[in-house]
Image: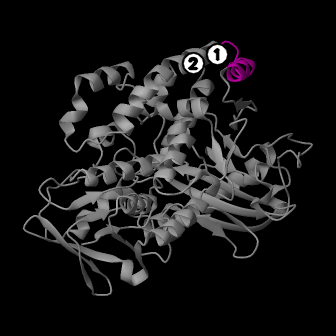
Amino acid sequence: MKIGIVGGGIGGMMTALLLAEQGRQTVIYERQESLGGRLAYEGDGLQYRIDRGPTIVLLPQMLKSLLAEAGIGESDCELLECDPLYNIHYADGKVLTKYRNPAQMAEELERVFPGEGAGVHRYLNELGELFEAGKAQFLQRSFVRKREFFSGRNLRLLGKLRVHLSARQLAARYFRQEQAIDAFSLQTLYVGGLPAGSPSLYTFIPYAEHAFGIWYLRGGYAGLSGLLAHRLTEAGVEVRTGAGGFVREIVTRQGKVQAIETHDGLRHLHSQVIFNGDFPYLPALLPSEKLQPRREYVPSSGSILLYIGADRRWGGEQHKDVETGKVLAHQFFLPPSLTSSLERLKSGQADTSGEVPAYYVFNPCALDAGAAPEGHSVLYVLIPMPLRSAAVDGKRTDEQWREIGERLAQRVLDDAEQRAFPGLRAAIRWKKLRTPADGEAEGWYRGGSFGIAPTWLQSGAFRPQMVPYHHLSGLYSVGASIHPGGGIPIVMQGAKLLADHLQSGG
């Protein structure tokens, strides 16, 4: 009997391909008309197209290795290295360029923040010793049995990582000035966690930038979903989309999975089902099960996203602006206090205060001239939006989110034009706004862009696992909300863990 996979995001697609390599047949059920989940494009349907979701490619060797296991070779997807990594623009006018090379990074940090350069070598050396052990112990292992997480070896490693500290607090062990600490802790935002609220375990993200670089997939990260979809066809994986792929219920009986019922009223027999969605939504698909109540999950940070097509270029070797010099593909813009600004956004106090929040701009034409028509650009502007409790955010309508998004987007566009993109407003020919309400409508938990948040109580053994309920045979989970966590290569690693588990008879 074929294995049913509920959800055609990156986790579901990779799991299907890895199982196909084992000779096992699967059916993917996806309620949208196309596969890919968060890995998709936005565009005007004419000349502009840009990634909707992820833009930063980390852990390139892990990505390529996992794709190879799924039957996709390196020649199928070209990775371009971002060198330098990115710029960080501070509110006081300072600009820090992040470099992969330790000596360059130390020199640059010393230039912008005198006295801080020496911390770079200590930071990279100490974390380098821990990264490989952490990768083997936490990223490449599942914790179906939670007690396995609390082995003596893991506890010693967690102690060395000082997991009682936040990622920001750990960065403060190496750097003293607030702005330098920001430069080595803001990266938790990549997986929807606040630097001051994510455990030090996630310091591996900024470390990985320097150890392995930041990369760009030519044509956009979303192109990966098309490659995977094509490979699914080649592998003979059955795919159901739209009403026929919209799952109403996972049917169980006497503690075993029996079938999947879709919204078109059909029932499809499966003795094994894999849920690839934001985990908090799984219980609603199991109405016949008396599941133990759990505290409310903390959603990851949401995003106000602005997609832009412009008739001007900024950055790139062939398109230098006199005013700004080389503008990189990735740029971060910080307010006077990143921590305070994020907390005000979370509480709702910054919506109408007039302040410019932290934001990120992705400018792929700086790396890939073919990302937009000649002489034009596509830009992606992301404003992190920490989400509040359901009792508060549940009252926000789509219209209210759009009002908030429009206000913040206008401030950000004004700021970006002054600090790095001269002539931006006049050059805009197409734009589109996206809010957490849009994400929630697509099945993202409470509109969070990255599944559930990477808090201490939602990490490692405390994060939902591939076997979600031990009393229910035949049910499995994969995706950004499942251990080992969010980020495209990490979700793909979770798919590999699950495929290996099933192959071993789990």
Q: Earlier in the sequence, mark 1 or mark 2?
A: 1
Does residue 52 appear in the picture of this structure?
A: no
Membership of 108 in magenta stretch: yes
Magenta stretch prevailing secondary structure: helix
Outermost residue toward the right in this view: 322
Q: Label 2 is placed on what type of residue? A: Phe
224 or 295: nearer the viewer: 224
- Front residue of this view, candidates 3 and 149: 3
Kindly tell me whether residue 496 is visible in this rendering: yes
Do the numbered discs 1 and 2 sit on residues whose CB atoms are within 8 Å?
yes
Is disc 1 surrounded by few (<14), some (14 to 19) or many (20+) residues within 10 Å? Answer: many
**In the rendered view, does 169 fall on the left or right side of 330?**
left
Q: Amino acid at mark 1?
A: Glu
Determine which of the numbered discs, if any, sits on residue 152 in the image: none
Q: Is residue 221 left or right of residue 431?
A: left
Q: Is residue 498 left or right of residue 269?
A: right
Please tell me how many numbered marks the rendered image carries: 2
Give, as a single range, the part of the protein colored magenta.
103-117
The residue to which callout 1 is attached is 116
- What residue do we see at 31% from left, 63% from top? 275
What secondary structure is marked by label 2? loop
Which residue is label 2 attached to?
175
Q: Residue at x 68, y 49 (%)?
A: 361
Residue 499: % across, % down: 33, 54
Comparing 25 with 114, the one in front is 25
Q: Quadrant of residue 244?
A: bottom left
